[in-house]
Amino acid sequence: METFDSKTLMKKFHLFFEEYKKSDIRKAVNEGYEALLVSFFDISEYDISLGDTILTYPEDSLRLMEETLKHFYEDVQTKPLRVRLTSLPSTEKLMIRNIRSEHLGKLVMIEGLVRRKTDVRPKLKHLEYLCTNPACSYSEEKLRVPQNEDKARVLKACPKCKSGVELVNKDLVDSQNLVMEEIPEQLENSSDQPKRMNVVLQNDLVSPFKDSKTNPGSRVYVIGIVKEIPIKTTSGSDSTNFDLLIDCNFIDLTEDDYSEIKISKEEEKQIKELAAKDDVVDILVKNMAPSIYGHNRIKEAVLLQLFGGSGALKGDGIKTRGDIHILLIGDPGAAKSQLLKSASKIAPKSMFVSGKSATGTGLTASVVKDDFTRGWALEAGAIVLANGGLCAIDELDKMSDEDTSAMHEALEQQTISVAKANIRATLRCETTVLGAANPKFGRFDPYGDISKQINFPPALLSRFDLIFILRDIPDKKKDDLIADHILQTHRDKSKTVTEIKPDFLKKYIAYTKSIKPVLTLDAIEKIKEFYVSIRNVAGDGEDVKSVPITARQLEAIVRLSEAYAKMKLDKRVSVEYAQKAIDLLLYCLQKIGVDPKTGQMDIDRITSGVTASTRNLYKTVQQIIDRLETQKPEINFEDICDEAEKINIARAEVQKTLDKLKQEGIIFEPRKNIYKKLL
Ligand code: ADP
Ligand code: MG
């Protein structure tokens, strides 16, 4: 092992800097940088023993390097240059969960997601004193007291002559705290809870919330020294237990691609072969979640969601999302959670959470008090941490009100803005959402408003590209098949073994991530034709046009056709894919968007919670009241019913409509069964 001989080491570092870093140092000094980036590999290549020394005595080595650097800019007045090590050998790379006391004082590298970031606070670094006794040497040479602990260390008397001392200088640094969390796909066992670690950033490393590099949700790697801090007992004194933190030396974003997933040449060949098959969609559907019987259209939609659309940055700088959001609403026990789990297993990057969120930080983002710095901190929720991947959210109907409102922005703009306390930030969340919701009253009522049944604002509901209803209706034949399927799979595990392994599917999806299919003119024509025709079909009503689909669904079709193209490794979206997308959307709309009274498709049921025919009814009844009011001073219930009967509206409907109008304050009932219009 290397011993630490400052003089020799300083000489070696000096030579290294002289030879390799001279121009970098000049540049850093001239441009007023506060840090010099040095690669560990450059040092150890230059002199392997220097590398070993850095690993054995990181703190002292870094200090020595910074001292050495001073010789290079003695002539200029500038802030001291810090040394930042930009790389470390892979042997020093650790999982957060594997950091132990043996690593104390050592240089390590960890990779993770930034979960929480505090605001920047000044922190005491040194106190400097002079002795009041003129005879003592410390009356001229400053006494430096380093502050490494929570509690400030103050000096009462000179350690040499015991005379009084005077505080002459206070050295503060900017400090910021991050909480990092392990990356889910790096965990060996997908059911493991990711572990967390505190990371302290100081000086030039601190960054405002504008800086997205270290904002919550980013994937970063950190090189730093492991340190311990005593955990305070309840009475405020130090306990014998310690907490770990990493004193950061360097932090940077990791490449945000799918590099974790290695695809061999052989696998690439297999992917191409599979994609070339005519029935690739059916094959994939068959191999997705084989333990779940049926739900083939849903499986197909979820697969498309995993492939995703192209997304585009338009000429005017507006970004359209390529992510396809899907919501499953259904009766309990309809395999919703199972579908979500299997989707998150196949997705190359994914997170599975429950809307109620066990962590208390919610799904989106929140501003919390940080125990460590006692300041405010911004903490990311699952949907931000899943940036660039899939977030499967179970029990979505149970999310908090704050999350519900933040979700609007998250789903469409794919950002989350936070403005609370002194924290203002916009976090990126290019996340695909697969949600599941249970109806509020236990079972789904096909005639009721969807948005009321799952306690969701209609505007939020409209942000999902596809909404599926899973109903659990007793059906002898189907029940037989499901029961057989479930019982068989319990008896014989091999029944659910598929020819395509989830791992391969994951690689297949990752492989297509770089493909951005473009619509062909034919496909555009096809989609347009469909859009125009369906918007006209339903517009028969005289007063209220029921708008069957909106521009949102139009975009959904585009995204779905792009996803079909990706599945086929096709760079062009042909008519065939557009047709498939239209079919899928129609299937889904028929299940929910169809107005049960007219049989017509009506997207208003989703977006405003009221169907066009109901709205028509409101209008008609109001018109009757208007007409009657010109004839009589008082209108009673029977009069209205008589009029309504003439145009085939049943008494029960009239009663329901009147109650509704009363609720909304359009009419009132001064006496029983007597109605009047409010103004
Ligand atoms: P939900 O989340 O919709 O309430 P779950 O996903 O928890 O329901 O499913 C409940 C159980 O019923 C699971 O064990 C699931 O395997 C089973 N189940 C329900 N529907 C099916 C189906 N179509 N095929 C196979 N198993 C099913
Ligand atoms: Mg469930």
Image (cartoon, rainbow, N blue to C red):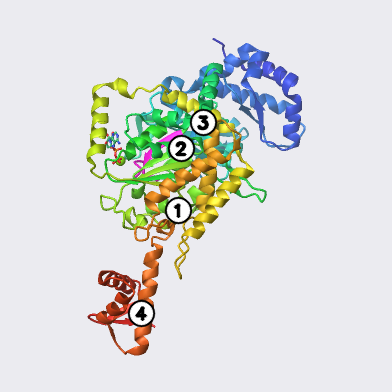
Residues shaded magenta = 350-362
Residue that carries the numbered disc 1 in the rendered image? 462
In the picture, residue 499 is in which quadrant?
top left
What quarter of the picture does the C terminus occupy? bottom left
**Could you say where residue 8 lies in the image, as x and y percent from the top left?**
65, 14
Residue that carries the numbered disc 3 in the rendered image? 247
Q: Residue at x 34, y 85 (%)?
A: 628
In 3D space, how far apart are the residues under numbered discs 3 and 1 (Cα atoms)?
A: 46 Å
Q: Which amino acid is tagged 1?
A: Ser
Q: Which amino acid is tagged 2?
A: Leu
Please tell me which residue lies in front, 432 or 524: 524
Q: Residue at x 25, y 50 (%)?
A: 442
Q: Secondary structure at mark 3?
A: strand
Q: Quadrant of ligand 1?
A: top left
In 3D space, how far apart are the residues under numbered discs 1 and 2 (Cα atoms)?
A: 19 Å
- The mark nearer the N terminus, 2 or 4, is 2
The relative height of residue 401 versus residue 83 in the rendered view (above or below) is: below
Disc ID at residue 624: 4
Q: Secondary structure at mark 2?
A: strand
Q: Which amino acid is tagged 4?
A: Ile
Q: Main secondary structure of the magenta part?
A: loop
- The mark nearer the N terminus, 1 or 2, is 2
